[in-house]
Image (cartoon, coloured by chain):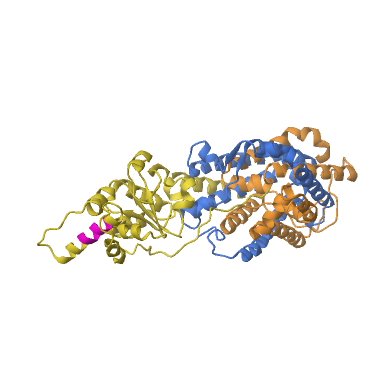
Chain colours: A blue, B yellow, C orange
Amino acid sequence: MAPLVENELISGNFNLLIALFIGLGFGFVLEQSGFSSSRKLAGVFYGYDMTVMKVFFTAAVTAMFGLLFFSLFGWIDLELIYVNNTFLYSAIIGGVLMGIGFIMGGYCPGTSMCAAAIGKIDAMVFIIGIFIGVIIFGIGFPLWEKIYTAKAMGPLKLSDLIGVKDGVFLLLLSVMALAMFFAAEWVEKKFPRDVY
Amino acid sequence: MKALKYLSVAFVSLGIIVAFVPKQAITPMKISSEQIVTEIKQKAYFISSDDLASIIINKDPLYKLVDVRDVAEFQSYSLPGATNIDLKDIISPDMEEFMNQDKYTIIMYSNSNLEAVEAWILCRQKGYENIYVLQGGLNNWYETIVNPKHPATTLPDEDQAKYDFRKAAGKALGVDVNDSTSVSAATTSKPSAGAKPSTGPKKKKKGASGGCG
Amino acid sequence: MEQSSNETVSHKKAKPYINPYIGGVLLGIVLLSAFFVAGEGLGASGAFKNVLSVCAAPITSADNTTGFFAKTYKSLMEDSSKWWIALEVLGVLIGGLLSGAISGRLKLKTEHSPKITKKRRLIFALLGGVFFGIGSQFGRGCTSGAALSGMASFSVAGFLTMICIFGTGYALAYFFRKNWI
């Protein structure tokens, strides 16, 4: 049955309304988890607050379990789920630049929206920065169009790349995530911790 | 810490379940195996050579013939208007646009039933609709249409009529071009199977176009 | 364990944040519902590109439809489902505001380490935004669109981008420590 839009169970306009509500949930959960504070977010890099890592991996693993179980029950057609296309060089360059942006600015686009909504001025400035960044990318696009589209590997799944079933892959990933969570709890105790 | 403990229990137990679930159960299968088994048992996917003959003679645009044999066999002999798609390419992404649709009916054939039926099963597992198989393949086609046996005179009239149709069809298809009037005999005969799929048209998209950047 | 101590020092009124694991599960459910409804995950940076391409349309439409923004604009005009992400991000703003209002965290302020000035914090925030803006275009999505949703759909790009974001962050953490601790 799902994805609802792909199987035309709901109309395009209704889909856009749902987008608003899903975004609302997204923003609400981010803010409730403390992602509206840049010092809390940046804590993940210094060990004094590992919230980002905990929320991020718990969310990813939860959604993955959801997808596999929904598929198992026949509620969702995994083949219609969008798998991000892999462009090797572009993904690495993008990741590195975003890493720099994260450690300097302390936000990512989603969380900056959330923080700006509750009145963080630094987040509003960060958003202006994003606009400038996207403009720079757009204007200079001809310069890096080649590298942007180089090494196209299509919608490649990591589980297929290493040759295991999705389920086995997810078990490994959840065990890894849990190991990281226990390490995070230990690290948080080790480093002095302020409250933001 | 308590939340993490609950989370650990949940993740590990759910993880073990998904790790041991057979791949087929998770890998998308648009049609359940049970349904395909039922369809195989019913043999409703077969279309007789007589019906196909009239389709070809009528040049019905709503039917497309697909030859699932290899290129060499296709070049040495094929049915008029057939497209060659090797069995190994039948569900390839390149062919999906042609095979997975609801605008026309595809009739697949091979030398016997075997490869065409295999192709049919592959297509059904992918959820393709409107696909039929020429019963008996080209061998049966040859025996019934190209070179029909004259029925024994003791047999009932309908066999004689069938023979006449086949003879006429064969002629119309260029096997024997002596008698042009026989074309009308072929065109007036209606295909009995009707070859219309029972399921309604269903639109399919290629998946979410997505992407954030 | 942590929610009890949270937020009590800085401003007394504010409610504590929820437990990160519960937050994670909730976020996972939101992400799953995005997959369930639209067939794709969450995102944020795409909205920036869309807004810009619409704003820039009068300029970019002049030079045929070859430009980066012109292409985006064209696809937005042709396919209404491309607006999904823009509306979703609008929802994020509303959701954040709602959550902040409920928990008493609505306050106009610049958050920074006591070791640095407000001005320095804002300059770094702007620069960080610029890097994130460029990076999110290369990565075809940001932390939510490429890393989180990409990971959830088992995409190689998702895992790769996630590792690069956090890897770079950790590699450079030492140089920016004054800004945060």
Q: Which of these two is toward me, B137 or A141? A: B137
At 52% across and 40% down in the image, what residue appears?
Answer: A159
Query: Is B91 in front, or is C180?
Result: B91
Total numbered labels placed on residues in the image: 0
Q: Residue at x 43, y 47 (%)?
A: B91
Is residue B138 something that shows in the picture? yes
User: Where in the figure is residue A141, as x and y percent of width and height?
Assistant: 74, 42
Residue B166 located within the stretch drawn in magenta:
yes
Residue B192 visible to the viewer:
no
Does C125 sit above or below residue A73?
above
Q: Give the range drawn in magenta.
A: B163-170
The magenta stretch spans residue A167 = no
Q: Position of residue B1 (x, y in %)?
A: 63, 47
Prevailing secondary structure of the magenta residues: helix
In the image shown, does C6 or A61 lie closer to the viewer? A61
The spot of residue A91 in percent (x, y) is 66, 39
Vertical position of residue C35 compared to residue A149: above or below: below
> Residue at the spot x=82%, y=42% of the render?
C127
Relative image position of residue A148 (x, y in whole percent): 68, 39
Q: Position of A138 compared to C161: left or right? A: right
